[in-house]
Amino acid sequence: MHAHLTVKQAPAMHNLDLPSYLEQSDQVGERFGRLKQRPVVLEVEQLGKEFEGAHGTVTALRDINFRTHRREFVCVIGPSGCGKSTLIRILAGLETPSSGRVLLDGKVVHGPGPDRGMVFQGYTLFPWLTVKKNVMFGLLRTGRGKMVAEQEAMQWIDLVGLGKFASSYPHQLSGGMKQRVAIARALANQPRILLMDEPFGALDAQTRARMQAYLLEIWQNIDITILFITHDLDEAIYLADRILVLKAHPGEVNELIEVPVPQPRSPAQFLSPEFLATKKRLEELIHPPQAEEDINADHLNMVRMVSVDDDVESVF
Ligand code: ADP
């Protein structure tokens, strides 16, 4: 599977005659038209977050506004420190905003709730519980009887393809399998939205590609809206209907991109003109070309480091 191409593997795309990432085929345009008719699940209004640090106030997020429609897949991308984790923690109710608000199905979010499922990068399963008991955990807490919880848990475990491993413990599973259990556990509570913070970041490239395809399959089969944080451009384009691009210091919305790649997605699209055009745009936004003055300043600093340290090897 070629779901994880790097820039170097792609043909020199800056030299290709690519269409604009804003161009949409009729099929894609119609899909976005339908998507926008769907009810809004998540609304983020004028959201801001400031932290008091040892060196003064840090504005982690400023004036964040966006909406997510039912069964939409939104990826959030941006350079390190642009507030991605802060945003998802506020959406999860683990952090309170300094200004603005978050609404889920029109109701203001205060604190965590079963209407939001979460999957993080670290494996968050209970190591002392079997796969089945991990998935049953939330179901029992929301008042289901043991039999019902067991039946429902097994349905979700089957959905993620781990029926044979229901009695296994997390340490007996691979990284990808653990994240599948985490997805089953999050979905079992039937949340309105699934919040995923770099869930595949710790996996090797091949497993990651499999998990991406897998997540798309699950998403297509159930009624779930997904907000997914990543710093991987290919992953964002492959998965998302729209990509929210943030910029850092302060964390603000740079652009909200409608991905022009048709659905359903397949790894064969990684080299399509629409895919490459979107990737080019994301690269412009996230890694803007360094200004000439900055390059000169960097060069000067290097020369200074060499002459001060007199240690060429440490620089080159
Ligand atoms: P990202 O996930 O995009 O890397 P974060 O949300 O982790 O960004 O952080 C955004 C900014 O807020 C950074 O400058 C970070 O140092 C700051 N920040 C995050 N959490 C805290 C905190 N608990 N206290 C102080 N500053 C924080």
Image (cartoon, grey):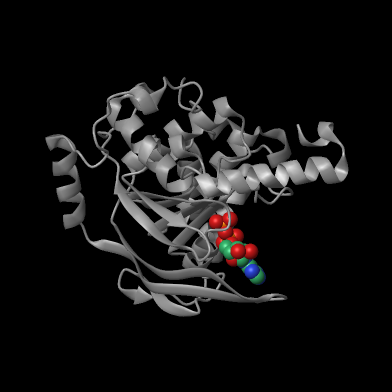
Q: Is residue 130 visible?
A: no
Residue 123's place in the image compared with 109, above or below, is above
Judged left or right of residue 32, residue 181 is right
Judged left or right of residue 31, residue 254 is right
Ligand 1 location (quadrant): bottom right
Which of these two is toward me, 80 or 108? Answer: 80
The quadrant holding residue 106 is bottom left
Judged left or right of residue 221, residue 89 is right
Q: Is residue 293 visible?
A: yes
The residue at the point 26 percent across, 63 percent down is 40
The residue at the point 64 percent across, 45 percent down is 298
Q: Position of residue 296 (x, y in %)?
A: 59, 44
Which of these two is toward me, 203 or 97? Answer: 97
Q: Position of residue 237 (x, y in %)?
A: 38, 38
The residue at the point 26 percent across, 34 percent down is 263
Residue 151's place in the image compared with 275, above or below, is below
Q: Quadrant of the C terminus?
A: top right
Q: Position of residue 97 (x, y in %)?
A: 50, 76
